[in-house]
Image: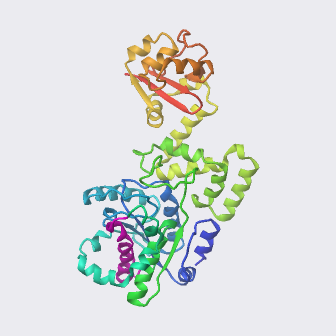
Amino acid sequence: MYDLIEMLRARGMIHDITPGTASQLQKETTAGYMGFDPTAASLHVGNLAALLLLRHFQLAGHQPRVLLGGATGMIGDPSGKLAERSLLSEEEVHHNQLGIQKQLGKFLDFSPGKHQAVLLNNLDWLGHQGLLAFLQEVGKHIPVGYMLAKDTVKNRLERGISFTEFTYTLLQAYDFYHLYTTQGIKLQIGGADQWGNLTAGIELIRRKTGQSAFAFTTPLITKADGTKFGKSEGGNIWLDPKMTSPYDFYQFWLNITDEEACRFAYIFTMLENDHVDALIQAHEASPHLRIIQRLLAKDLTILIHSRADYERAARATLLIFEQGAPADLLDLVEADFRGLGEMIPQIEVPKAELDEAKHPLALITRVTRGVIFTSQGEARRMIQERGVKINKVTVKNPYQEPDWVLLEGRYLLVQRGRKHHYLVKGI
């Protein structure tokens, strides 16, 4: 059995680790778990590093367990949060669990076998736990001072933390203790912001059984501005195509910076380390080719969505943003436009108004209901700056005669500036 921890460390996927963890993983096949609270109907790109780490864990010959917190999801983890979470009902949490379960199968093998991944739900044991029994079994063993020293609690004391969220660490600690004693799970894995919760579980196991347990965390993946991805954060990139389209997902990876690309190549691919080293060398030699960005965009879109979604997103990107020529639009068929309508904003207008548009200014303001431009003055200025294209042809005069062809008899592709594209559909 190879040194999993050393391999993960070389890839930048280890943040904190308890003593003896590497030895434990080399000594024997180990059952380890990672928890996700179903506070949204989908996981997001911030969870990808953890999911791929679990895949490495399984491929290394260990037994991954995924805990979807049916109980803790109704409480709310204060880790990394500046304010209280909104409480969810059991029905809402269950709905979210079902959405997340569908995504987990893309990363882990749940088929029967020695290294089978297993899904767990802490509502199965916490849901029947009475308050008095919990206080006797858990609360008695964790001093208040120990709790107050945890960053997850300490960072919230000034702003305020409810007793509900204050107890979250105890619930997660009990999860580890319960799984250790009933299923022989010796390892817990989590994000870097979970370190206090993980070590609380190890401490509870030590105090109640006298035995050792293990844990390690993976670094949090942050946005370009340094803020973390999270289910309650704005501008998130979700794994559910209804929440983030395959096109937007593909574009996210295509547009990461070169610095992010070199770091993410180790984290978000399953390539061997030396292969990633060579990939980074090729990228640094020709950064304009965006080798890593294209690789990540392709592989992850296929993994999370499908090859068909990737091919549509790549084709749309090539056509819209890169070397596609106006004449290329004539090759598109109805199915292509349906795909485009799922990837970029689509504006539906009466077909008669499209046919009767007297000039570009009318089209991009009045006919499209102010979606592209809210005022004629703004539209005129951008046309004068050569910032408007219709069917990939630059508009030079706001009042020129219409020279566009309705694609497939009812579509127009309008571009505002470099990055904003709209599909106008006549209905």
Instruction: Using the image, determine if residue 103 lies above or below residue 394.
Output: below
123 or 272: nearer the eye?
A: 123
102 or 236: nearer the eye?
A: 236
Q: Residue 408 in the image: x percent, y percent?
A: 46, 22
Residue 175 highlighted magenta (yes or no): yes
Residue 138 visible in the displayed image: no
The C terminus - image quarter: top left
Residue shown at 46%/75% (left/top)?
A: 149
Residue shown at 44%/26% (left/top)?
A: 371
Magenta region: 161-185
Q: Residue 263 in the image: x percent, y percent?
A: 63, 58
Instruction: Using the image, determine if residue 134 lies above or below residue 251.
Output: below
Report whether 161 appears left or right of 228.
left
Q: Residue 307 in the image: x percent, y percent?
A: 50, 47
Among all residues in the image, which is located at the extreme right? 285
Residue 197 highlighted magenta (yes or no): no
Residue 283 visible in the displayed image: yes
Q: Main secondary structure of the magenta part?
A: helix
The N terminus - image quarter: bottom right
Residue shown at 38%/80% (left/top)?
A: 177
Report whether 7 appears left or right of 192.
right
195 or 303: nearer the eye?
A: 195
Image quarter of residue 78: bottom left
Q: How many marks?
A: 0
Q: Residue 349 in the image: x percent, y percent?
A: 39, 21
Among all residues in the image, which is located at the extreme front? 158
Chosen colour scheme: rainbow
